[in-house]
Amino acid sequence: MPIPTTTREYRLPKVDGFHNLTLQEAPLRTPKSSEVLVKIHAVSFQYRDLIVAKGQYPLSQKENPVPGPDMAGEIIATGGDVKGWKVGDRVCANFALDHVFGDATDESKATGLGAPIDGVLTEYRLFPAHSCAMLTTYNALKGLRPLKGGDYVRVQGTGGVSIFGLQFAVASGATVIATSSSDKKPEITKKLGARHLINYKTPDWEKEVLKIMLIEVGGPGTIMKSLASVRYAGIANAIGFGGDMSSLPVAILGKSSIVRGILIGSRTQFKDMNRPIVAQNLEPVIDRVFSFEDVRTAYEYQESRQHVGKVVTRVPED
């Protein structure tokens, strides 16, 4: 196919709400020697997209960004020095483009898609030729103290991170405790392999889940109960933001707990993550798919927290 010279992309000229999402046409250059041009087929949304649109993201955020870090697409052109990738390869983007291996740095954080730099809510995008919610979860479960068969894991809620965490934990042989604010959603997590189901609106639910490892996505409203539910010397992987955390140090010391902040993961972890995905034939849970022209409605649905798994927009073919 001929290389396109323009792309349709969403931008946020103002950041006081996702009603500002504006679809516009932009020029598209040819790939540099070490870049690939990707036709984006689908973009999925996450909580971070909502707070970026509202100007509430606590890390750095550029003006008038193209939102979104999570995509699936296909390479349609490559630069002359690109090796290991070819036209027709199906690809995903790493959350921080320059986080290739090791721990995150200030420099790699500055390449985070959809906030510090333009994201993927567009028809076409150029990427450097070195390799999203799924990687966040994989890092949480495998990064510090790798999960093993027989461990207990509590996942909170039914968003993308938690559902992927459930799938990875079950595939690793762990026993999963799924908590949700609804009595209906846990039935879905049970079908995916969760052994125990708890409504976290129940008082003192933390007493029921004194186990080894959990994934905390709820932020200030739930993290204290989450720490209370961890066994002594257990791990809480914190992915959410915000709120008064002044009493957190006492809670950590009182249980000898480890609280680990998760900043997605590196390209190396991304490759490692894909091995069990292929071996276990894991498939993402897609709650609902919206058209590219209906992105604002997709944001509204994401904000409603009615979804189980991922909310996705399908980017049209030419």
Image (cartoon, rainbow, N blue to C red):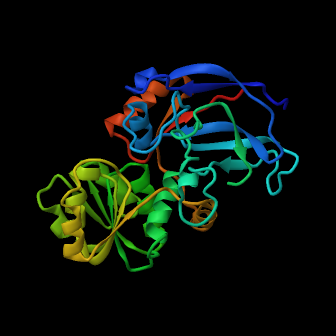
State the image coordinates of residue 291 (x, y, percent, origin top left): 54, 27
Quarter of the image with the C terminus in it: top right
State the image coordinates of residue 173 (x, y, percent, origin top left): 44, 75
Q: Is residue 80 above or below residue 245?
A: above
Q: Is residue 124 above or below residue 202?
A: above
Asked if residue 229 can be seen in this view, the reply is no
Q: Is residue 105 left or right of residue 268?
A: left
Q: Is residue 256 left or right of residue 314?
A: left
Q: Is residue 37 left or right of residue 133?
A: right
Please give the name of the residue rendered at 12% of the width and 62% of the height, measured from the top-left corner.
Answer: 204
State the image coordinates of residue 32 (x, y, percent, origin top left): 81, 41
Q: Is residue 56 above or below residue 189?
A: above
Q: How many marks?
A: 0
Please give the name of the residue rendered at 23% of the width and 66% of the height, measured from the top-left corner.
Answer: 249
Quarter of the image with the N terminus in it: top right
Asked if residue 146 can be seen in this view, the reply is yes
Query: Which is more toward the observer, 281 or 108?
Result: 108
Farthest-out residue, left: 203
Please give the name of the residue rendered at 54% of the width and 43% of the height, measured from the top-left corner.
Answer: 69
**Residue 186's quadrant in the figure?**
bottom left
Please give the name of the residue rendered at 61% of the width and 62% of the height, measured from the top-left corner.
Answer: 274
State the image coordinates of residue 161 (x, y, percent, origin top left): 43, 53
Farthest-out residue, front: 106
Query: Which is more toward the observer, 211 or 57?
Result: 57
Q: Is residue 124 above or below residue 248?
A: above
